[in-house]
Image (cartoon, helix red, strand yellow):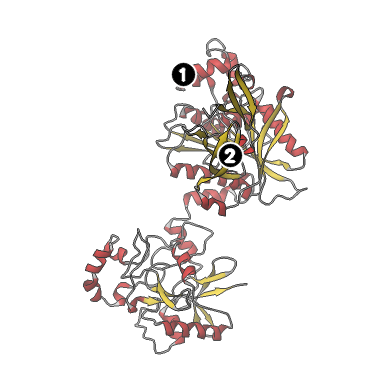
Amino acid sequence: MTEGGVHVQLAAGPRMEPRFYEKTADGWRTHPVSDARLRHSTSIRIGPDGHTIAFVYSRADSLPQYLVGTYRRGRLTNVRPFVRLNTYLQDYPIPRAEVIYWEGAEGDTVNGILYYPFNYRPGRRHPLMVVIHGGPSGVDLDAWRADWTVYPPLWAQRGAFVLRPNYHGSGHHGLEFVESIKGRYYELELPDIIKGIEHLVAQGLVDPDSLGVMGWSNGAILTIALTVEYPERFKVAMPGAGDVNWISDYGNCAFGVRFDDSYFGGPPWERLDHYIAKSPLFRLHRVVTPTLIHFGDQDTAVPTEQGWQHYRALQQLGKAPVRFILYPGEPHGFRRPSHQKRKMEEDLAWADTYLFGHTSMAERLRRRVLPESAPLALKLRARRIARTADGRYGVEQNGVLLPEMVRLDDTLWVGRFEVTRAQFRAFKPDYPVPPGTENYPASGITADEARAYVAWLRRQTGQPYRLPTVAELEKLQRKAGVSENTLAYWLGYTPNPDERRQLEDVLADFRPDELLLPVGSRPPGNAKDPDAPLLYDLDGNVAEWAVGKDGRLQPSGASAVTVRDPRTKEVPAPPPAFIGLRVVLPRH
């Protein structure tokens, strides 16, 4: 209710049609609302004063904006933000999107949301991922959506278009459209989707030999049907919670009677031939598309046994690569973020193998049996770490031991380890290095010694070595994991500041060599990222000298006798005996 009448958001395909209904002495008078923002809003509230309006405005390629303004008789004024959420997403690329239209089944006009790849160039054909909504009476709106079943930016990042079609049976398009598939399940939806793909191929946008298809629930049902009806068309399919056998669905689905009677015209004992004809299970011998199947083991909307039937048939037929992932404790819609994340990661990996050709199945199998985060995989990667014949870390140049540098990004290389004692002694021959501690981090280093070491490196190599800035070192420290050599490691728990002060007398009795570890002793914080360089002791062992904003050096990071406060993220000042250094090398 609003001042003088009622504001209504009418369903209008992929958008809304806002209207103001004015109450008059003769009844209701309709006024169109021309403000485009309300055509892209599905969440509106009008305050008790009748003219203050709060609404969410978004489009498929723009983040939601939470706005408040004044509404009077269909006109918006004084519109402004009232809260800003998830602003960090503005730093990430968002694919361009638009609503497209084409002629679908029975000559009807259907529509969908098309997202462009990040590397789109006119005249070049790109892969296409078709992402099909569920329901079947769901709908894809020209509004922001990014979740564990729909994530266009990740496909755009891989150079693919994304099409989200509003097929016959979709909601938001009128009662006739949504009920058009009753008694004709599959018969209109599949042509709608195929004609949408052909429309993009005819426009020269999409490579017809690089098609993928995926969806959840009814989106998975249509995904499966497409691999049956068009077995040579799709290079990859990723259905989640999709039916293959409508006969068993009738008894096992929580609402099977209502759904199946409505869409298939009665129970299976009255229409058995119809149920068999509609069930993909009995035609899965046609499927050659590599298929990844997702299911929760507590699903009662699309019973889990549907996934087992789908998998068992493809696995026994042996014509298509197939994998079945079962998520424990999950109903029809996944609830655990870890499972949602894994579902996305598995989809991307499957498409990388069979659509984009980035990995082979042999590589994927190896990663399954030997995950990148496994200690054994880490050992294999660590074999590439530079060391001398006698086991000292670093590289030799003209007989001088120097730090090994690894590329962090396009502009900066960074020392894999803190400068070791053996490396520091190459600069300062009288620096004491007890036998067996050559690979310990250089410790007890003053600010002047750190500067002098960097200057010596420049002279030795002709390269612009320097100490990191505080900001650079903090960026590196954020990559550190919980297994760094800090006081928390030696205590078995993270002490609070009071506990740390109570331990000062105890810690004062320890020599540095009793608590320091050889560089690289603790697992690197970025070990789970197979593409990241292995960087060690980023926030432990010794604190490291860094250049502050004022140009002065200050120790940064935790050490073997200090630890970062988990709440404030601050670190107590380290004792001088536990300060060392790491070097960086800018690249232009």
Label 2 belongs to which residue? 321
Residue furthest to the front in view is 25
Please tell me which residue lies in front, 309 or 402.
402
Dot 2 or dot 1, earlier in sequence = 1
Which corner quadrant of the image does residue 103 belong to?
A: top right
Q: Residues within 10 Å of mark 2 (few under 14, many from 20)?
A: some
Label 1 belongs to which residue? 251
Is residue 143 rendered to the left or right of residue 100? left
Is residue 203 rendered to the left or right of residue 522? right
Q: Name the spot of residue 322 as percent of width and height, x first.
A: 56, 38
Q: Residue at x 37, y 71 (%)?
A: 541
Q: Name the spot of residue 451 as percent of width and height, x first.
A: 47, 83
Image quarter hosting the C terminus = bottom right
Is residue 287 rendered to the left or right of residue 551? right
Tag 2 secondary structure:
loop
The amino acid marked with disc number 2 is Pro
